[in-house]
Image: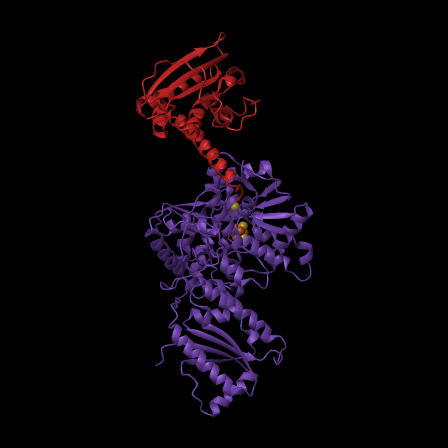
Amino acid sequence: MHKNNIILYLCNWGPHVAFQDLLDKCADIPHEIKMIRIPCTGRISKTLLFKAFEIGADGVALVGCVAGTCRYGSGTNVAEKNVEDTRNILDLLGIGKERLELATFLPDDSNELLEFLKRFSQNIQKIGKSPIVHQKIDFEKRLISREKIGSILKKHNIYVCQDCGKCSSGCSLALSGKTFSPRSVANSLIAGDIYSENVFKDIWSCLTCGKCYDICPMAVNFPEFIRDIRELFRTHGMSPRETHGGFFQSLMRTMISPDIKPLHWQYLPEGIRLNKESKTLFFGGCSPYFDTFFRNHLTVSTFDIMVDSLKVLNFFDIEPAILENERCCGHDLLWSGDLNSFLELAKLNSNIINSKGFDTIVTSCPECLKTLLYDYPKYGIKLNPKVVHIYDLLESEIDKGAVSFKKFDKKMLFKEACRLDLGENEQSKKLVERFKKIQDISVIPNECCGNSSWVGCDAFSKALQTKQLKQARNMGFDLIVTSCPKCQIHLKCAMEDVFIGKELEIEMMDLTSVIAKTIFWT
Amino acid sequence: MNNLKKEIIITGFGGQGIILAGKIVGMASALYDNKESTFVQSYGPESRGGFCSAQVVISDKTIDYPYIKKPDILVCMSQGGYDKFIYNLKEDGTLIIDSDLVKSNIQREEYFSIPATRIAEEMGRKMMANIIMVGFVTSVTHVVSLEAAKKTVLESVPKGTEKLNTEAFIKGYDYGMATLKSREKKASGNIGA
Ligand code: SF4
Ligand code: SF4
């Protein structure tokens, strides 16, 4: 038995002829290589490349036709981009970009192909086994019982619903035009309608934005209810259609492997002051992966938010520590129903963080905040340090005096994040109020950016985003200020529309970045 | 060894708690900083709502004379007090003003200002402006130590208001620290993030 697993995605056309030739000659192709025949390298998405690693590959070779000889024209070019991005993700994840290679051959190149396969296999031998542990999912075979649904209904007190209809009239999705009503989803489940297609669709299309919860007079927490139902569905094999083929869920699951050492902080620019001894931990989030994944597409730069956060902390001479091998907080796993993986990741994170003796965790990501502050304790995961959002910390520093903001020459629209409710957060609210006194900025409360936790994006998500962007432009704003990196990603996606994209374009910047650009000592 | 003697005048109008502020500074250094101090209070002719001042001397040695002609530190919480004492302040002395109540009309590079009354109002009690000022003086001048001043504030304010007054003191102190940091940043030419 060979130790390593190497996947060879092999294009049907040019290189397959070469490969066939090797087989006919009984050439000594390294045994650990498992070949998968594919129609074209251009069809192997980043997700397919990455999933191979998630389920146990130590190396992946994507082998296609020499550029210019692609049967479909652009396959090789697409493959180049996909491979480069995925290699960069592997690099951020700390498992080494060399584990993935793209190579191209002509039909006659059988010797060259053999040489390549041998060399690649030796390389993988040298790097060793991948530290990723495959998280196997065992689906529950039995049907979902009404009791199970009943206990979730009870847990979230769904029976107090008065059928007033407020939630449906304020629901972000319903307002985008979709035939969708939180109340009727709950009613269907109460009636025992568990396996209908509509219920399935609705469970996975709710944006979990919490708008309904905000307005419900009986305080029915619909998004959390949905979260539990999703978990139940997923464990019974009723998984959602994840966006981007489930790339991000895969990525997060790989982070459960105890031996991987993500290195996504490695590209921090010079001049940022950090202190290993600090009692304050800055928890960054997954921005570097987002930026890499969407590089060719949206050109978002959400890593700037992390950098600007550190700059503003440094401005106040706060030199925080960072976790060199920081992992994802697990937000998207939790909200897309993968509770087991979430718990594994959360335990790993809390063990690492608690072992270091921090007293405070600061984060600028609303999802990390909500997850670390509320959801970890909710699931019995204890974090010793207190968790605060960077706005809280900034407000208390700014309140000490001697700092002010330069006027930023933009008409700004501040979009509250669903995971950071200013109404619940006194300090953040004060900061925004303070900012308003100097800047031309209006606040729009919790308006969903159209997607959450990488599930269920559809035409209605797009409609929602389009409407928001058009409104912002029509009202004469020239900068949308966000506080969540996801808002930037999702809204930017709408601006990429080939037909109406131009009409939607508007600049976006995170509030922390605007603060970093304008704050000064008086 | 040099005798580190500091002469401080705090001035304002009656009702601002000027006298209490002076008393706290003097007591703090005598009781908890192991120094000698004297304290003299004076009211102007119209003591109710009119001009008043407190004179505090702090020294490592015995103090022979408690009155001050040329203060090292002048704290002004009213324009009247400022106008009266500004020309007495030593050449290299430290001027501290309530920025909303006093307009400094002479060119002085070295002066500190804090909107103490406004901050007190924002905290819900205008009366606490003096305690905020004590906090500010503590951080920008170091004539008394933080611990000594904090303790004395606690002991000097009316029962039941300790928590609020401590908060006020810390506010003033933090404002001072922020002001010093801002100067440091400016000196290094690095005022942005
Ligand atoms: S969480 Fe948002 S999308 Fe889901 S039902 Fe409530 S308002 Fe609608
Ligand atoms: S708003 Fe609340 S009470 Fe009203 S229908 Fe919706 S869940 Fe029921």
Name the quadrant containing residue A328. bottom left
As drawn, the residue found furthest toward the front would be B1
Estimate the x, y position of residue B96 in percent, counting from the top left. Answer: 48, 24
Res. B41 image quadrant? top left
Between residue B151 and residue A440, name the one nearer to us: B151
Q: How is the image coloured?
A: by chain
Q: Residue at 59%, 55% (x, y): give it.
A: A491
Examine the image and state in which quarter residue A388 appears.
Answer: top left
Picture quarter with the C terminus of chain A: top right
Q: Residue at x 61, y 54 (%)?
A: A465
Q: Is residue A126 left or right of residue A412?
A: left
Answer yes or no: is residue A183 visible: no
What residue lies at 40% left-to-right and 80% top-to-bottom?
Answer: A32
In the picture, measured across the screen, residue A76 lies left or right of residue A138, that is right
Residue A77 locus on image (x, y percent): 59, 73
**Chain B color in figure:** red
Instruction: Supply the letter of whichever chain is purple.
Output: A
Quarter occupied by the N terminus of chain A: bottom left
Q: Is residue A192 above or below residue A103?
A: above
Residue A12 position within the rendered picture, expressed as x and y whole percent measured from the top left? 55, 82
Tally of numbered discs: 0
Is residue B182 visible in the rendered structure shown here?
A: yes
Q: Residue furthest bottom?
A: A25
Q: Which residue is most to the top? A: B45
Residue A29 against residue B142 in the figure, above or below: below
Vertical order, A228 against B50 (above or below): below
Estimate the x, y position of residue A459 in percent, counting from the top left. Answer: 61, 60
